[in-house]
Amino acid sequence: MKARAIWVAAALSLAMATALGAFGTHALRPILTPERFASFDIAVTYQFFHSLGLMGIGFLQWKDPSNRSFRRIAVALLLGMLIFCGSIYALTFGAPKGIAMLAPIGGGTLILTWVFAAISIWRSRALAD
């Protein structure tokens, strides 16, 4: 992924998180149990934060275009968000409870991706002081 593609993916994810947050507040809150709404709200919050992080990864890719690590990080972030947030969204809309087992996989993907991002930033010659 080039920097522009990462920024587009991040912006679209932010737009989706905004739309889902509004939909959840106005349409889902009255019909979901407080526990299910809280889970939905967590997914929206995580999507927001990781989308902003993805935007930052796009800037790092732009600053250091020869570093393929940032491309991989962007893909891994998107995958982690899809698995983590997507499984919670799916549960909110009635998916089988077994889908809940995907959330920790997505969360672990996000955690490991940020660790890999820290290592890649540290090693990047283009980002050195």
Image (cartoon, grey):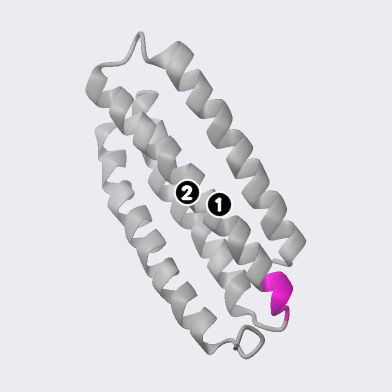
Q: Position of residue 20 (x, y in %)?
A: 52, 28
The answer to whether residue 85 is left or right of residue 99 is right
Rendered-image quadrant of the N terminus: bottom right
Is mark 2 in CB contact (under 8 Å) with mark 1? yes
Residue named by callout 2: 49
State whether residue 95 appears in this view: no
Judging by the rendered image, the residue that carries numbered circle 1 is: 52
Category of crowding for the residue at label 2, using alpha-carbon neighbours closer than 10 angstroms: few (below 14), some (14–19), many (at least 20): few
Q: Is residue 18 above or below residue 129?
A: above
The residue under the point 36% across, 63% down is: 111
Residue 1 visible here: yes
* Quadrant in which the C terminus appears: bottom right
Q: Main secondary structure of the magenta part?
A: helix
Whether 94 is among the magenta residues is no
What's the amino acid at mark 1?
A: Leu
Q: Give the magenta-colored segment's residue range.
A: 61-65
Taking the image as shown, residue 73 lies to the left or right of residue 106, namely: right
Snapshot quadrant of residue 37: top left
